[in-house]
Amino acid sequence: MARPRARVGLTGGIGSGKSEVAKVFAELGALVIDSDALAREAVAAGSEGLRAIAARWPATVAGGALDRGALARIVFDDASARAQLNAIVHPLVRRLALEREARAAAGQLVIREAPLLFEGDFYKSCDANVLVIAPPELRITRAMARSGLSRDDIERRIAAQIAPERARELADYTLENDGTLEELRAKATQLYSILKNA
């Protein structure tokens, strides 16, 4: 399946502002494919992914729906279980993403928004990769306000993600989100122009 000319990976840890950058890119005309949304679709009621999860961890499915909390408790601190879950979900997400990419208009920038972009090899198939970063304390404050998670939960999630220093080495472009929302949107708009004309 042929893909559009320009595929851009977009990533950033929890509370970094990645989703706001994706929103700006979409407003400017990009096709944004949200890996988290596709992951939810991949395990929706009646899906192939949900059936596979039910076969592996029956207690995580009730009434034909996934109990995300139960699944999170199993996989968060267990690397082997997490790898098994990824082996179920990731191929389905890739397939759904390629279906979405096929709908892109000629010359349209395709943004693959993925929290774990650099944890696998997918970033190597992108024409460019963008990292959104923010100071740790700011990330924690934002994530707590948005998600309702405790500080401890967010710190554990940050610790489980790729180190920002390593992500910066792998990224082609880095957006520093250490100011206002307006400043981030301005930076994203400028970067979009660069990516579109690359």
Image (tube, rainbow, N blue to C red):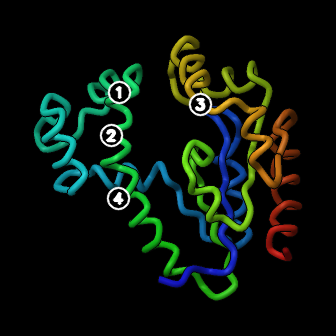
Mark 4 vs mark 1: which is more N-terminal?
1
- Judged left or right of residue 61, residue 118 is right
Q: Which disc is residue 161 wearing?
A: 3
Q: Are marks 4 and 2 in contact (CB under 8 Å)?
A: no
Q: Quadrant of the C terminus?
A: bottom right
Mark 1 vs mark 2: which is more N-terminal?
1
Image location (x, y in percent) of residue 21: 72, 52
- Label 3, residues with CA under 10 Å away: few <14, some 14-19, many ≥20: some
Q: CA distance from mark 3 to mark 2?
A: 17 Å
Q: Can you say whether 163 is above or below 137 in the image?
A: below
- Judged left or right of residue 146, residue 83 is left
Q: Are marks 3 and 2 in contact (CB under 8 Å)?
A: no
Mark 3 vs mark 1: which is more N-terminal?
1
Name the residue rendered at 85%, 69% in the picture. Answer: 193
Considering the numbered disc 3 on the image, is that residue within a helix, a strand or a loop? loop
* Residue located beneath label 1 in the image: 75
Considering the numbered disc 4 on the image, is that residue within a helix, a strand or a loop? helix
Q: Can you say whether 27 is above or below 115 in the image?
A: below
Q: Which disc is residue 92 wearing?
A: 4
Mark 4 vs mark 2: which is more N-terminal?
2
Q: CA distance from mark 1 to mark 2?
A: 8 Å
Name the residue rendered at 70%, 36% in the picture. Answer: 16
Q: Quadrant of residue 60?
A: top left
Q: Quadrant of residue 14?
A: top right
Q: CA distance from mark 4 to mark 3?
A: 22 Å
Residue closer to the observer: 86 or 51: 86
Q: CA distance from mark 4 to mark 1?
A: 18 Å
Name the residue rendered at 30%, 23% in the picture. Answer: 74
Residue closer to the observer: 155 or 167: 167
Q: Are marks 1 and 2 in contact (CB under 8 Å)?
A: yes
Q: CA distance from mark 3 to mark 1?
A: 14 Å
* Residue located beneath label 2 in the image: 85
